[in-house]
Image (cartoon, rainbow, N blue to C red):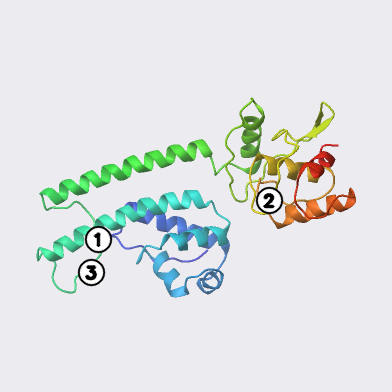
């Protein structure tokens, strides 16, 4: 485990929480700053500033860190957005203090911790902004509770499977990178079905995503052709599995799942 420097005492609690999450991801990955720089678009010195609370990382850096560490991007971006609001508020208050002559030349730009002793419109604006941040955070948390991206693959997959097959109108498909959904293939009215879609005609090629893709991935796996993770996204591995299946069934080998391929998958 890395021995981190203590974060600045003046750091806003929302920013502090975000930086702590970044540090945990970095520790869990086992990557050094140099290795992290090699796997992302940002230098080791940049990561040193981000992970020690000296500078707020840009959104792209947060997304790259989540990708490299295999973390949930949605949750991390929610924390980043809240931290960004806090960081902007602090910078604005510091700039106003400098303009009012309340800060001596060379004073650090990070404002001190604690309540703002200066009354007036600016203080009112800060309170309003803080209330807006709280409201935004509550809304984002509500979205996360609905989509539940932190659930383990089996539980989340079972929830989506039930929603997709529990009525005439399936739930909207939401792709979550790295989430595997369950494949329970059974025969219904003579056709093999995984319960995600009853289609026999939908065309699928690279970069397609949806319940139909998940259905095809499950059926390919059932027939012994590994499409990779059953996540509802039609990538290279799924296409390779479709090509192998098409070749074995004497179909046109193009990796595009269409009516002829669906007919064989349903057998």
Residue 118 placement (x, y as % from top left): 11, 53
Q: Considering depth in this image, is 113 or 215 the residue closer to the camera?
A: 215
Q: Are marks 1 and 3 in contact (CB under 8 Å)?
A: no
Disc 1 to disc 3, C-alpha distance: 11 Å
Q: Nearer the viewer, mark 2 or mark 3?
A: 2
Which of these two is toward me, 254 or 50? 254
Q: Residues within 10 Å of mark 1 (few under 14, many from 20)?
A: some
Looking at the image, is 222 positioned above or below residue 47? above
Q: SS of the residue at dot 3?
A: loop
Q: Quadrant of the C terminus?
A: top right
Marks 2/1: CA–CA distance:
44 Å
Identify the mark at residue 249; answer none if there is no mark: none
The residue that mark 3 highlights is 108
Q: Distance between the Cα atoms at labels 2 and 3? A: 51 Å
Q: Residue at x 56, y 69 (%)?
A: 39
Q: Position of residue 206 (x, y in %)?
A: 68, 54
| Residue that carries the numbered disc 2 in the rendered image | 234
Residue 187 placement (x, y as % from top left)? 82, 30
Does residue 200 appear to the left or right of 145 in the view shown? Answer: right
Residue occupied by mark 1:
91
Of the residues under marks 1 and 3, which one precedes in the sequence? 1
Query: 37 and 169: which one is in front?
Result: 169
In the image, residue 54 sits, relative to residue 154, either above or below, namely below
Horizontal side of residue 105 vs 147, given as left or right: left
Dot 2 falls on a residue whose secondary structure is loop
Q: Earlier in the sequence, mark 2 or mark 3?
A: 3
Query: In x, y percent, where is residue 166?
Result: 65, 26
Q: Of circles 2 and 1, which is in front? A: 2
Mark 2 or mark 1: which comes first in sequence?
1
């Amino acid at each position: 485990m890395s021995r981190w420097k203590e974060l600045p005492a003046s750091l806003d609690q929302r920013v502090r929480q975000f930086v702590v999450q970044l540090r945990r991801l970095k520790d869990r990955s086992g990557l050094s700053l140099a290795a992290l720089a090699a796997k992302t678009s940002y230098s080791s010195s940049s990561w040193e500033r981000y992970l020690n609370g000296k500078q707020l990382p840009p959104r792209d850096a947060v997304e790259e860190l989540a990708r490299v560490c295999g973390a949930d991007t949605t949750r991390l971006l929610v924390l980043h957005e809240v931290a960004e609001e806090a960081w902007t508020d602090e910078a604005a208050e510091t700039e106003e203090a400098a303009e009012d002559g309340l800060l001596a030349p060379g004073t650090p730009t990070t404002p001190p911790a604690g309540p703002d002793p200066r009354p007036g419109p600016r203080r009112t604006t800060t309170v309003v902004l803080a209330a807006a941040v709280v409201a935004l955070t509550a809304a984002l948390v509500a979205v996360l509770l609905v989509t539940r991206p932190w659930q383990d693959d089996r539980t989340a997959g079972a929830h989506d499977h039930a929603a997709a097959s529990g009525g005439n109108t399936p739930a909207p498909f939401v792709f979550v990178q790295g989430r595997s959904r369950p494949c329970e293939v059974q025969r219904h009215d003579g056709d093999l079905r995984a319960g995600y879609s009853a289609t026999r005609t939908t065309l699928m090629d690279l970069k397609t995503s949806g319940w139909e893709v998940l259905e095809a991935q499950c059926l390919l796996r059932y027939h012994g052709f590994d499409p990779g993770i059953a996540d509802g996204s039609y990538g290279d591995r799924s296409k390779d599995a479709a090509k192998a299946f098409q070749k074995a069934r004497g179909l046109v080998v193009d990796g595009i799942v269409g009516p002829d391929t669906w007919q064989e998958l349903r057998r």
